[in-house]
Amino acid sequence: MGLGGSGWSVVLAGAGLMIIGKLAKICQVQAEIKAGFVLVALLAVGNASGRIVAGFLSDKIGRTRTMLLVFLFQAVLMFLLKFISNWGLFILISMLLGFNYGANLSVFPSVTKDWFGLRNFGVNYGLVFTAWGAGGLILPYVSGRVFDATGRFDLAFAMAGALLLLSGCLTFITKPPAPARR
């Protein structure tokens, strides 16, 4: 997966963890919902279902195509998020954001194994998951800074959406590594 794979991991993890960490505050700011923690729990239901559906889908249409769909869908959700201001839509969007976040927890290990094999899977997936951790630090931190400066999350949503679109574009140019010559 090389640089593209690590970049995918940083962006999708960052966007997902930004929402997981800030969802209660987002609900409070945008809709005066005081029980945003309930939406975090519903996001977890979406997360679990995303793992199952994406695993099935990636077996049917391929890993990279599945990632493209997830990145684009997640980007659309990020761009829509600033317009959400009622419980019903927050429930739906929360579950869908969780779905996309969870989807990659099934696709990323599979693509790592497919592209690099099982021989060094632990090391290779460890690198991908390290990038995941970096995303979990960067985007939530940036979104917090954006909120502190503006009192809103709109710019953070737009930045995450743009990065997800860029990640979707990377699916067209990132290729599995060439087999090693012996």
Image: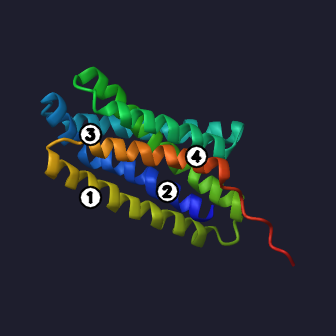
Query: Which residue in the protein does label 1 denote?
Result: 141
Residue 131: image location, x then y, percent: 46, 64
Task: Kindly give the residue lying farthest to the bottom in the view shown.
Answer: 182
Residue 161 seen in the current view:
yes
Location of residue 36 (image quadrant): top left
Mark found first going from the N terminus, 4 or 1: 1
Residue 114: image location, x then y, percent: 70, 57
State yes or no: discs 2 and 3 in contact (Cβ < 8 Å).
no
Query: Which residue in the protein does label 2 denote?
Result: 9
Q: Nearer the viewer, residue 137 or 164?
A: 164
Amino acid at dot 3: Asp
Q: Residue at x 66, y 47 (%)?
A: 172
Q: Mark 4 and mark 3: span between their CA atoms?
A: 23 Å
Query: Which residue in the protein does label 3 denote?
Result: 154
Residue 164: image location, x then y, percent: 47, 45
Q: Nearer the viewer, residue 135 or 124?
A: 135
Q: Mark 4 and mark 2: span between their CA atoms?
A: 14 Å
Amino acid at dot 4: Cys
Q: Are there few (<14), some (14-19), or many (20+) residues within 10 Å of tag 2?
A: many
Mark found first going from the N terminus, 4 or 2: 2
Query: Which residue in the protein does label 4 denote?
Result: 169
Location of residue 28 (image quadrant): top left
Q: Comparing marks 4 and 1, which lies closer to the viewer?
A: 4
Amino acid at dot 1: Tyr
Q: Mark 3 and mark 1: span between their CA atoms?
A: 15 Å
Q: Mark 1 and mark 2: span between their CA atoms?
A: 17 Å
Element under label 2? helix
Element under label 4? helix
Residue 45 seen in the current view:
no
Q: Are there few (<14), some (14-19), or many (20+) residues within 10 Å of tag 3?
A: many
Residue 5: image location, x then y, percent: 57, 59
Q: Residue at x 63, y 53 (%)?
A: 110
